[in-house]
Image: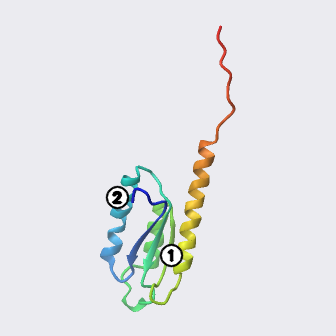
Amino acid sequence: MRTGQGFFCCYSITSHSSFEEITAFREQILRVKDEEEVPMVLVGNKCDLESQRQVATAEGAELAKSFGCSFMETSAKTRVNVEESFFELVRAIHKARQTKKELVKPGKKKKCSLF
């Protein structure tokens, strides 16, 4: 975790308990990274098992909004949104890097005057 630049927080849409654990995982990532925000995508997996759904899409979207990250539902089995979720994470990493560069931009150097 310490060296990761971006993270997927994944849960199964067929398991509400896996969804409930996501907040703890995110907090652990933030604690290990010693950051307030890290590039992250919240992923609800197994969207091909709609008939067994226990976590509503709206619940996932709401949690992602509270985290300030993107949200996607995927299916590893049918490859729905798998590549797209990786692309989204890469975009989040690039955006975070750009933001850090802007915060660290050196300003005008001031000359020191002694009287």
Q: Which residue is mark 2?
A: 28
Left or right, 94 with reference to 31:
right
Q: Secondary structure at mark 1?
A: strand
Residue 54 percent coordinates (x, y)? 36, 82
Q: As shown in the figure, which amino acid type bears the numbered disc 2?
A: Gln
Q: State the residue at coordinates (44%, 89%).
A: 77
Furthest toward the left, the residue is: 17
The quadrant of the picture occupied by the N terminus is: bottom left
CB-based contact (under 8 Å), mark 1 and mark 2: no
Picture coordinates of residue 37, whole percent (x, y): 47, 54
Establish if 51 lies above or below 68.
below
Image quadrant occupied by the C terminus: top right
Q: Residue at x 38, y 85 (%)?
A: 53
First in sequence: mark 1 vs mark 2 = 2
Q: Which residue is mark 1?
A: 72
Relative to the observer, which residue lies in front, 19 or 98?
98
- Answer with the quarter of the image where residue 9 lies: bottom left
- Against 70, residue 28 (above or below) is above
Spatial distance from mark 1 to mark 2, Cα to Cα?
A: 21 Å
Front tag of 1 and 2: 2
Residue 106 location, x and y as percent?
64, 38
- Seen from this angle, which residue lies furthest bottom? 51
**The residue positioned farthest toward the top in the image shown:** 115
Residue positioned 39% across, 61% down in the render:
26
Q: SS class of the residue under badge 2?
A: helix
Residue beneath the point at 59% across and 42% down: 104
For disc 2, the neighbor class at 10 Å (few under 14, some 14 to 19, many from 20) is few
Badge 1: few (under 14), some or many (20 or more) residues near its Cα, within 10 Å?
many
Number of numbered markers: 2
